[in-house]
Amino acid sequence: MDFCIDTKELQNIVKVLGITTKVNTIDTTGRILIEASNDGFVNFVSNNLSIGCSIKTDKVSVNEPGRVSIVYSKIKSFVTSFRPWDDISGVKEFNIHSNDKNVFINVFNVLDSGKSTKGKLVLDNFDSDSIKSPTFNDQPNFVLNSEIFKAALSKVLYSIEPNNTVQALQGMNINFNEEYIRFVGTNGKTLSEYEVANTGNLKEGTFILKYDFLMGLRRAINEETQLFFDIDDHIIKVSFNNIIFWGRKIVGHEFPAY
């Protein structure tokens, strides 16, 4: 594998990957997957076995396709230590290439004085098949504006108790009918509901979204956008911009009548 990637782009990607990657371990939950393809895209994936995300970027120049798995905390420390290029100084891009055993990250840094330095990070190349990402259905179950989703969270999040002994109360309930979409959270003592008009195609359905998924998705949304929700029997996936974010929904437990 061999490609170059814009500095700001890689730094932003690393920031988002930190939402779903554990930093104090080198096992699968503390690693990321990098996939470079012949079509000019590179995909970054992290999955801590509870929530995960994949980020696809075209701000790259792919010289050789391939896939590697590396420890997240080490690439984070290295990548975030450099200042992006400002037309005078800084780093324009990172070059990432690999062999069977190692991954190499090279950087050419121009200092404010005009002098330049070279940096290099060598990482172990782990089994790339150990990190999985689900496929996304081209026809999502429903679409929500991110501002509506964040507004709903702000109204009901304080009522959710992620460690509640009743599993149905460990997340936010979303209910669809012909007229409204209702977002509800309760800890059994207090309850909060947020309601918006249902202008989409889904007119019937109920889903309970886990707390860690909600918190992670809220952190991953950095601008107003459309959120495309794809839900199967156990997994909920949300696609927006160049990101797919996923987690497990609560199944086998009904949200209490209220």
Image: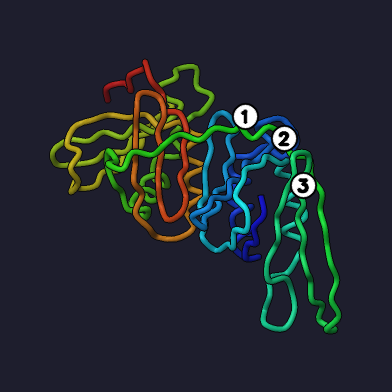
Q: Quadrant of residue 248?
A: top left
**On the image, numbered disc 2 is attached to which residue?**
126
In the picture, measured across the screen, residue 133 lies left or right of residue 30, that is left
Q: Is residue 190 visible?
A: no
Amino acid at pointer 3:
Lys
Secondary element at tag 3: helix
Q: Are marks 3 and 1 in contact (CB under 8 Å)?
A: no
Secondary element at tag 2: loop
The residue under the point 45% across, 31% down is 210
Q: Are marks 2 and 1 in contact (CB under 8 Å)?
A: yes
The one of 231 and 175 positioned closer to us in this rendering: 231
Would you call the spot at circle 2 few (<14 residues within 10 Å), some (14-19), or many (20 or more)? Answer: many
Give residue 130's mark. Answer: 1
Q: Looking at the image, tell me whether mark 3 or mark 1 is earlier in sequence order.
A: 3
Q: Is residue 185 visible?
A: yes
The one of 183 and 106 positioned closer to us in this rendering: 106
The one of 143 and 111 positioned closer to us in this rendering: 111
Give residue 74's mark. Answer: 3
x and y, in percent, of residue 180 in the image: 19, 41
Q: Quadrant of residue 67?
A: top right
